[in-house]
Image: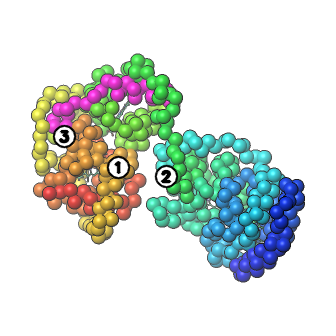
Amino acid sequence: MNMRRGMVIGSALIALVGLMSSSGLTFASDQMAAKEILQQNCVQCHRLEGKADSRFNLKAPDLIWAGSKYRRPWLIGWLTGKEAPLYAKGYRWDLSEGPSKHPVVSASDANVLADYFAEHNKDPRVTVGAFNLSKVTKFEADFGAMAFKAHACLGCHTINEDGKIIGGPQSTALHASGQRYDQDWLFRFGLNPQDFVPHSGEFLADATEPQLRAVIGYLMTQGVSDFQYYEPWTSPEFGTASVGRGKVIYKEYCSQCHGATGKGDGPAASGLDPKPAIHANIPFEKLPMEYLYNVINHGGPAIGKSPNMPYWNLTIGQQGVADVIAYLKATFKGSPAGAAAASSAPAASAMPAKAVAVPAAAAATAISSSGGRSDACVQPRKTAKAPDSFLVMTNPLAVSVEVLEAGKTLFQKSAKPAACAMCHGEKGDGKGMMGAALVPPPRNFTCNAMMKDIPDGQLFWIIKKGSPGTGMMSFSGLSDDKVWQLIHYIRSLAH
Ligand code: HEC
Ligand code: HEC
Ligand code: HEC
Ligand code: HEC
């Protein structure tokens, strides 16, 4: 087995490099020493030059481009035996079934080797700066995570999702990619894997360059718990945003659906279901910039809403997005009557068939004209009923302090595309700041008389897929466990 051989070489190597290392070596003699170490201890398994070849003709991954591929701390860690095996089933899984133990060198030799690779094994195909790590947004990384799965990458590579290692352990582990890879190498690899690993079981994805960039961005967050995401709304364009320019954009691009005065009654609205949001009822100043940016820049689906809300990034650019957000904030302050009226008004948009017939203008008028606060406990509920296979589901998690805490964090803060509290309110009473504009209004979880009759499986189904035609977006990105944590928390709010 590989493993025994590796260990013998490992100990022989330690003895050898122990003899060789000495403090006063110059760079040139370090390079000589490195060459010596490589010749003695590495080349029997690794190639340092030549053309890309099939894994089935190799003993170990090629180091031909080692000077471009790794982040230095990872390389030092790997060579000094501090990193986990990369191939769970062995690099040559056709010959072995488990990971092999890798030879270990001293820290000083590892540094000498890293210098040597940087000097002699740079890959001329890799463009330094081709991938800008400081411009990766949270949205892009989340999208990359989706694309990673959609393109079957998970079938052969492992990643870390919510602290669990998932995926097929056929090829190299990618769950610490952000610590391991140089981003420019990774990007070049992604452009054509066969330039590096032909006939090795590799896979060419039919992905566009933006998708590839999103996947690379996502991989570079793997294993980096404090990854610094780029926040586009801190860019210079936002610093110089203009309400005046935003007003022009609103007229040219938004009013066709949202209406000239933001009442949701533009010419396109009559044929849309769900209806365009009624901006006049939304207190934009209070909405998180991340949410506003994502819905306007990336479109409705970015926040779990209708794809009829277009993604505007290409049409109006960063400056346009910044300007129109400035205009929304300066113009629409929300309608205090909105929430109350919404809970008593007929739930037009919850009934798709009728909603088409109800002119948006009429719906908007109904909302702004009827006032007064309704504190109805049992809400009129037109929500679609979950399929039977869901209705029979019960919460598989035992309720505990930890589960409730986890549910609370998701509900109040961390759920994406938007924290539940933004609509359902911090207390779960349905009076969140974004809830005000919604017809029908968000569910009031504090109302035991109503909640006790809604089965777990119904809650689960709606959270996962949303309630189309209402403000309730889909949270399809949440794992089943997280949804069940939320359900325990929601139930704890009823009294
Ligand atoms: C007995 C064969 C063997 C020897 C000797 C050996 N390696 Fe490796 N090396 C491997 C295998 C196999 C892997 C794949 C890692 C795994 O299976 O987890 C690997 C992985 C690596 C990697 C990471 C490759 C990647 O996937 O990007 C580096 C870097 C590396 N070795 C450097 C060295 C250096 C430097 C030496 C000499 C000091 C050396 N290796 C000696 C077998 C060997
Ligand atoms: C059918 C299995 C399979 C699928 C699907 C697959 N890969 Fe791979 N991948 C491989 C193999 C095999 C290699 C070559 C390295 C090796 O010998 O394991 C590889 C290599 C890589 C490497 C370089 C690893 C290294 O350290 O040299 C990256 C990065 C990578 N794949 C990412 C992806 C991404 C992203 C996707 C989805 C678009 C994907 N892979 C889909 C099998 C697969
Ligand atoms: C083709 C029609 C259309 C156009 C044009 C359009 N929107 Fe929308 N927009 C929608 C629809 C439909 C929704 C509601 C989606 C839902 O509820 O699922 C929406 C929702 C929104 C929301 C989300 C409000 C909320 O409830 O959280 C914002 C913000 C928004 N649009 C801003 C804009 C801006 C700014 C423009 C112009 C740059 C614009 N929209 C142009 C159709 C449109
Ligand atoms: C953008 C506003 C908004 C956000 C954010 C939101 N909801 Fe809702 N939610 C609503 C609205 C509006 C309804 C009412 C839908 C209906 O009547 O069909 C609703 C209904 C529900 C229901 C009731 C299902 C039923 O069958 O009665 C559940 C459960 C629910 N939401 C859970 C959540 C959870 C959990 C989150 C956070 C992960 C969340 N919601 C985030 C607006 C929102």
Can you give x and y, in whole percent of width and height, for residue 420 in the image?
Answer: 30, 48
Residue that appears at 81% across and 56% down: 116
- Whole-angstrom CA distance, mark 2 to mark 1, is 22 Å
Which residue in the structure is indicated by mark 1?
Answer: 413
Which residue in the structure is indicated by mark 2?
Answer: 146
Describe residue 326's horizontal placement relative to residue 175 as left or right.
Answer: left
Is 108 or 237 nearer to us in this picture? 108
Which quarter of the rendering shows the N terminus?
Answer: bottom right
Are the two marked residues, 1 and 3, in contact with CB atoms closer than 8 angstroms?
Answer: no
Query: Of helix, strand and loop, which one carries label 3?
Result: loop
The reply to whether residue 315 is visible in this rendering is no
Of label 1 and label 3, which has the lower sequence position?
Answer: 3
Describe residue 299's horizontal placement relative to residue 172 as left or right.
Answer: left
Which quarter of the rendering shows the C terminus?
Answer: bottom left
Query: Of helix, strand and loop, which one carries label 1?
Result: helix
Q: Amino acid at mark 2?
A: Met
Can you give x and y, in whole percent of width and height, for residue 203 in the image?
Answer: 64, 57
Query: Of helix, strand and loop, which one carries label 2?
Result: helix
Q: How many marks?
A: 3
Describe residue 417's horizontal placement relative to residue 54 as left or right.
Answer: left
Is 22 or 137 nearer to us in this picture? 22
- Whole-angstrom CA distance, mark 1 to mark 3, is 28 Å
Q: Amino acid at mark 1?
A: Lys
Of label 2 and label 3, which has the lower sequence position?
Answer: 2
Ligand 4 is within 8 Å of the C-beta of the residue at disc 3? yes
* Vertical position of residue 416 compared to residue 397: above or below: above
Q: Residue most toward the front?
A: 24
| In front: label 2 or label 3 | 2
Residue 15 lies in quadrant: bottom right
Q: Which residues are magenta?
A: 317-342
Which residue in the structure is indicated by mark 3?
Answer: 347
Look at the image and say whether residue 333 sits in the magenta stretch.
Answer: yes
